[in-house]
Amino acid sequence: MKMQPKAEMAGVGSKQTGLILKPGALQQVLAFASLIVLILVFTFASSNFFQFSNIVGILLSTAVTGVLALGSTYVIITGGIDLSVGTVMTLSAVMTGVFITYWGLPVPIGIVGGILTGAICGLLSGVMVAKLKIPPFIATLAMMMIAKGLALVISGTKPIYFNDDPVFSEVSQGSLFDKIIPGFAIPNAVVIFFIAAIIGSVILSKTIVGRYNFALGSNEEATRLSGVNVNYWKIVIYTITGIFTGLAGILIASRLNSAQPALGSGYELEAIAAVVIGGTSLSGGKGTIVGTVIGALIMSVLTNGLRILSVPQEWQTVVVGIVILLAVYADILRRRKA
Amino acid sequence: MSLVTAGWSGVGMDDVLIQMEDIDKQFPGVQALKDCRFELRRGEVHALVGENGAGKSTLMKVLTGVYQKDTGRILYDGIEVEVPNAKAAQKLGISIIHQELNLAPDLTVAQNIFIGREPRRGLRLFLDEQELKRKVERLFERLNMDLDPNESVANLTVAKQQMVEIAKALSYDAKVLIMDEPTAALSDSEIDDLFIIINQLRSSGVGIVYISHRMDELKRITNRITVMRDGRYIDTVPTADVTNEQIIAMMVGREIYDSTKQNRIEGTSETVLEVKGLSRKGALRDINFKLRKGEIIGFAGLIGAGRTEVARAIFGADPIDAGEITVRGRKVVLRQPFDAVQAGIGYLSEDRKRYGCIVEMDVKTNVAVASLRQYANPFGWVNRARIAKAADQIVDMLKVKTPHIDQEVKFLSGGNQQKVVIGKWLTRDCDILIFDEPTRGIDVGAKSEIYKLLNDLAAKGKSIIMISSELPEILRMSHRIIVMCEGRITGELDREEATQEKIMRYATLRA
């Protein structure tokens, strides 16, 4: 028998509101503190860790999963999940390759086309979830396989290289920063990630979409009964996730200077992990973009640091798994106290 | 408006806000409403009563645009209107506060009130938080409400949440406010606060439709009462002209079980449950009581007094910091509900649909679900025939109204769902039963059946702890009454000496 304290209990129990921070803020502080602790630990453990080139490496490796995680945050706050972001990212990369390499379209148009591919996939997932009432897990699982298959079919299972137009690889690998401050070569991908995070954060906290995003995740029926077109906003939210996914596709294609059709599966889980470590609740209604950024950074700092300490790759994965468990359990403990 | 209807209502046209006439509504296989009418005047509180399934909610859903009527007409201020959807109803100034509170817990008070109508700026894409704040402050000032607009709704008590719902409804400039069982989750003092607000609204000319099962409230707050039964209009009467018994008679159209006589309990009856010094930090302090065989103890108190916490502690659902629980002379440690069930304790939550039964499954499965091992061989193979036999017995004994034991529980009425849950614990051989608000959301007819059932169970030697917020129910059912306040037991009364006043005094005996 599953039981839960009902509202009546709150009357007695909830008098410990001595917290200065709201629960959401506390969450972020905790995640941020863990990130700092990790960085300190690795800095002391190895002199190779806190080097400019290594930090840039960490940031660069965060960019792709980070942008995916940004997008996933929205869907997860609705209480849904998007399993398709990994392979949709690949499909977007492949489509960009088709546009630029096969069709010879200009790079900017190819980029827009890639992002649009992601947006359309997100839109379709949104329609499946909102209109057809297919559970998000199943709808996006289907989308994941469809995108995976399409990426292979369209590319003929072979990588598409962007050798004709060297500009494209600059999108990720180049550094506008280097031109402004010589020697301070932060790759564009990192800058794009942070800009995307800022825009993402504004969407979530300042716009009407963001408000409905939380409302939906918190109590969908109440939102519907308040005269909000719930289906419409759900589709919008899945589409936004798709746009971020498309952007991630551009970043990864540019970084590899090719669209690798076999890549992509598994990225969605890393994205979800980053979101969860960042304190967004899988049951919906709670979450922040800042948290997701920190979550993504924790993942790559961990992987990078462990690699520098020569921990074998297999064990790195085990550690990341444990970190996810700890993050979620800490969240449960906090909520039980509140 | 025709002369005939004006004559029927007996008041001037100006006073009538809503007039519903000859409303029919058919669902596949069910005539939900037949020739229904309803009239609401400006500045009146009009009770709409009837058993569950009488059509109250359906009629109000027609009025608020959730359902479309098949025939009939709705007049608003004397003009015929169509209400094709919820938004149209809002535009007309018709707001409804649903029985289940409809708020987003993770959003703030202000965000909840203006959900769907957020003040926007910058291409209508961005939220205007300043304007939102101003609007809410103005609203609270107008309603004389003391709520923090920036507090998360999750942190509010049920009563405060209800205030938010009311504020939300009134922020639509509601001329008509429909309240569906607004007091179901409120304590008596909170009900008083609610009634103050209702009175304010009434004097400002708002018409209020008040749906409730609680007779005493109708007397206190309503001007007129409309009774419905089986989807039909029965009558509309001024509240002052009828007695509770007359209303109930109109509602059920049959005689109601009255339990003034009750089986006595022997003073020498054995103690089956003894609780000593039970404490849980922040919730319970030094709880002591004994429950005897065949006894019904009523736990009274305001919401938040800790009654449910006692029940959960005895059921092993919450950890305890101190205290001793003895069942039939044997000391037990209850770490989880499983331990309690092993000791023969069954708990019936007030929220049957969530914690009581598995609504998607059929009656026989629900009856057997707590005791499947009894019906399984050592390999875990479940013997369906024996389950069916047990379920048939339960249905027979408790008079569960179900076409067959394969019926999914979600199609049963609240009262019958409650019986299925009782059946579940009886099958498990539980002889200490804890009922948490056993009649919440159950209509009058089914209520008296539940009362009768509780008395029968007690007469058969089951011991019952009944938590209830309805004083008449406590007074009528209990052999002994324990009153709690702020996590402590503040009073214990025998049924002979207990009165509503005494209980209320103990219930407000704060430390």
Image (spheres, coloured by chain):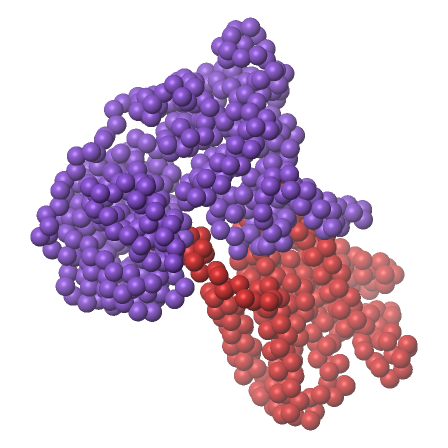
Q: In which quarter of the image is the N terminus of chain B?
A: top right
Instruction: Report x, y in % for residue B14.
Output: 61, 15
Q: In which quarter of the image is residue B119?
A: top right
Give the percent coordinates (x, y) of residue B325. Answer: 23, 64
Residue at point 61%, 39% (across, down): B143
The chain in red:
A
> Measured from the top left, where is residue B110 in percent x and y?
63, 48
Q: Is residue B467 left or right of residue B157?
A: left
A48 or B378, which is in the foreground? A48
Task: Determine the residue positioned at 59% across, 54% down.
Answer: B151
Chain B painted colour: purple
Q: Which quadrant does the C terminus of chain B fall into?
A: bottom left
Q: Would residue A282 be visible to someone looking at this image?
A: yes
Residue A63's image quarter? bottom right
* Residue B201 located left or right of residue A170: left
Q: Is residue B63 above or below residue B308?
A: above
Where is A152 relative to A257, above or below?
A: above
Compared across the picture, whether B189 is left or right of B337 comes to right
Residue at figure coordinates x 61%, y 90% from the top left:
A310
Query: Camera-side residue: B75 or A179?
Result: B75
On the question of residue B388 being in view, the answer is no
**Where is B333 relative to B353, above or below?**
below
Residue reaching furthest to the top: B3
Residue at figure coordinates x 34%, y 47% from the top left: B505
Count numbered badges in the picture.
0
* Coordinates of residue B326 in the picture (x, y in percent): 20, 64
